[in-house]
Image: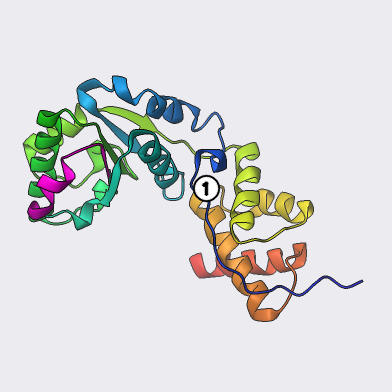
Amino acid sequence: MSDPLPLDHPRRPGLSRDDFMVAPCNAVALAMLDGWRGWPRGKLVLTGPAGSGKTHLAHIWAGMAGARIIAAVELTEADIPALATGPLVVEDVDDLASAAGEEALFHLHNLMRAEGHPLLLTGARAVAGWPLRLPDLRSRLQQAQSAVLEAPDDALLTMLLVKLFADRQLQVPRQVIDYLTRRMDRSFDGARRVVAALDDASLAERRAITVRLAGEVLDKLDLAES
């Protein structure tokens, strides 16, 4: 019997705690979020490479703490009074590229602390690598406790691939997963790109996801990145 042809389907990424895969590379960060009531100065900085789970963890914490979530690049001075009324997540602070955005974050940070509301900030790099030009803002964020997400080990990479395919409502043979973990870029972002590329190729070519298709897609990704 031939493999069934792929069907177009909605993307449904799971961001609940039950969807989060705990492994040595992220267990400490998760534990620090669980202990949010004891954060020094009421804030935590969560860092890790693209696709490492920062957004997922931010949503988990937002659910626990009843927090709102906003991207740092969307901050304005006008937003501050409304945002500083409860727990808050500010995502991708290292994407800030304007003096106005920094000023808004600085005033928001100070008001959050004055009001006693917890603040979670995320970024791909450590705070020392964030492009912050305000000395007072930089020093305040560098003083914050940090939680770091590390690169995935073999077990987590396998679980991640299975989850990413499942989010797209795809069931992929285990031999395809094993093949990918041996050959792909070993990162969270790499897993996300491979799964997206395989899904797109499967739909475009009306082919099931097999080891052969996986090899073709990886070769194309390698060529595109070389």
Residue 94, x across and y down, in percent: 25, 48
Q: Is residue 71 shown to the viewer in this render?
A: yes
State the quadrant of the N terminus. Answer: bottom right
Q: Residue drawn at (58%, 67%), measured in percent from left and top?
A: 197
* Foreground pick, 81 / 178: 81
Residue lying furthest bottom:
205
Disc 1 is placed on an element classified as: loop
The residue to which callout 1 is attached is: 187
Q: Quadrant of residue 122?
A: top left
Looking at the picture, the colour scheme in use is rainbow
Residue type, mark 1 in image: Ser
How many numbered marks, from 0 up?
1
Which residue is found at the position 38% from the left and 29% from the top? 33
Q: Quadrant of residue 115?
A: top left
44 inside magenta stretch: no
- Where residue 154 appears, as percent x and y from the top left, is 64, 39
Residue visible at 73% across and 49% down in the picture: 178
Residue 75, image x and y in percent? 17, 53
Q: Taking 94 as reference, is 141 above or below it?
A: above
Q: Residue furthest right?
A: 1
- Above or below — where is 224 with respect to 123? below
Would you say 154 lies left or right of 52 here? right
Magenta region, residue range? 77-89
Q: Could one spot residue 226 in this view of the protein?
A: no
Where on the picture, by quarter, is residue 220? bottom right
Horizontal placement of 103 versus 54: left or right?
Answer: left
x and y percentages locating residue 21 in the rendered image: 57, 38
Q: Nearer the viewer, residue 194 or 8?
A: 8
Q: Which one is in front, 198 or 108?
A: 108
Categorize mark 1 by other alpha carbons within 10 Å: few (<14), some (14-19), many (20+): some
Taking the image as shown, residue 138 lies to the left or right of residue 1, namely left
Q: Is residue 82 magenta?
A: yes
